Amino acid sequence: MLSKNEWDPLEAVIVGVADDAKIPPLDLSLITVNYADKNFNELEKIKVGNYPTQVIEEANQDLETFCQFLLGEDVEVYRPDKTHVPEYYNYCPRDIVLIHDNLILATPNPIKVRQSEWGALAADLSVYGNIIHHVTHKVDTLYNKKCLGNPEILALNETEPAFDAANILRDNDNLYYLVSNSGNKSGAKFLQELCPDKRVWTIEGIYSYMHLDSTIALLREGLMLLNPSRIKSIDQLPEPLQHWDYIWCPEPVDIGHYPGYCNASKWINMNLFSVNTGLVALEENQHPLRKELEKWGIECAMLPMRHQRTLGGGFHCVTLDIIRNHQ
């Protein structure tokens, strides 16, 4: 059985690579989904093209350190196929493919140039089952330009399903789906139709810029980590989560970003990854969060991730867990 939650003991995982990471030429999908916090005048300041060599090299060093840690925990580690040169990057496999129970879904990503990224993962994933790839048209009517500079207006209209896999957290038979700039309601409906024996719960009105895993982390059954800058009341969460224990994430230690390149807020620092219910990978400077997690019996492997704000992905983002041991 494939991974179906965020916390059971990890057996096999894909970890991303930073090779060939770039910001592609800005089209309507990239502007509205990734840069909705900008106005039109600010768009010209966005650096398009390959990331600096220093960023790529240091990010790959940190990813390799992470892989060696996982191997030391007897986890089988796969990497994206480097011959599959991305139009965007292969750094965050979490964005591209949703694995849940018997489902391997290359999601209908809203950013047009990312729709082929799953190809870098296909050879390894095909060993575990058939990959469903939902082909979409991504016509310009999907995107709402009025979202620029206005967090109350979402980037995606409802003309067709569109969502990143990172809009979703898995809790066995429950799937929690963030409606945001990177996932529309049509996507949640499509996912529910694809998984009729599961329950897809939408989370709305909390955070539009973009994924769920820097807002909520599911640590084990019945315990979650919450972002207090976004979650103001437990009543905002789906009904099953309203009965869980929770930890309010302390203020992150801001590790900064490479000058001119910032693709995540400081809250990416809560983007941890569970190896099992008693061990997580956490960015090495987040000692306030480490102390809170230790109160709940969770050990933290403090590891470098120097460019998680620069590239827009922490330990949960750069992983795609394939197999967890559901004891």
Image (cartoon, rainbow, N blue to C red):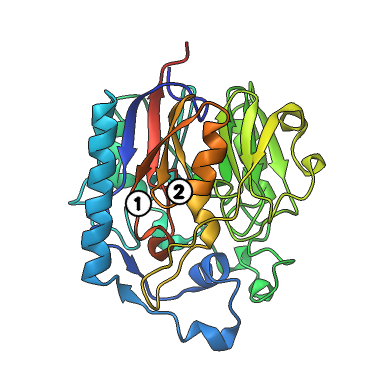
Q: CB of mark 1 within 8 Å of CB of mark 2?
A: yes
Of the residues tagged 1 and 2, which is closer to the observer? 2
Residue farthest toward the top in the current orientation of the protein: 327
Q: Is residue 87 visible?
A: yes
The kind of residue tagged 1 is: Glu
Given residues 179 and 193, the one toward you in this image is 179
Image coordinates of residue 145 in percent, x first then y, are 64, 74
Task: Measuring from the top left, give residue 45's x and y in whole percent.
Answer: 45, 85
Q: In the image, which disc is placed on residue 117?
A: 1
- In the figure, 67 relative to 160: above or below? above
For residue 208, side relative to residue 11 (left or right): right
Structural crowding at the residue carrying mark 1, measured as other residues with C-alpha within 10 Å and reported as few (<14), some (14–19) or many (≥20): many
Residue toward you, 50 or 66: 66
Side of 304 relative to 184 (left or right): left
Please tell me whether mark 1 sits on a helix, a strand or a loop. helix
* Residue density around tag 2, few if under 14, some if 14–19, many if 20 or more, within 10 Å: many
Q: In the rendered image, which residue does mark 2 sit on?
A: 95
Q: Earlier in the sequence, mark 1 or mark 2?
A: 2
Q: Residue at x 27, y 51 (%)?
A: 62
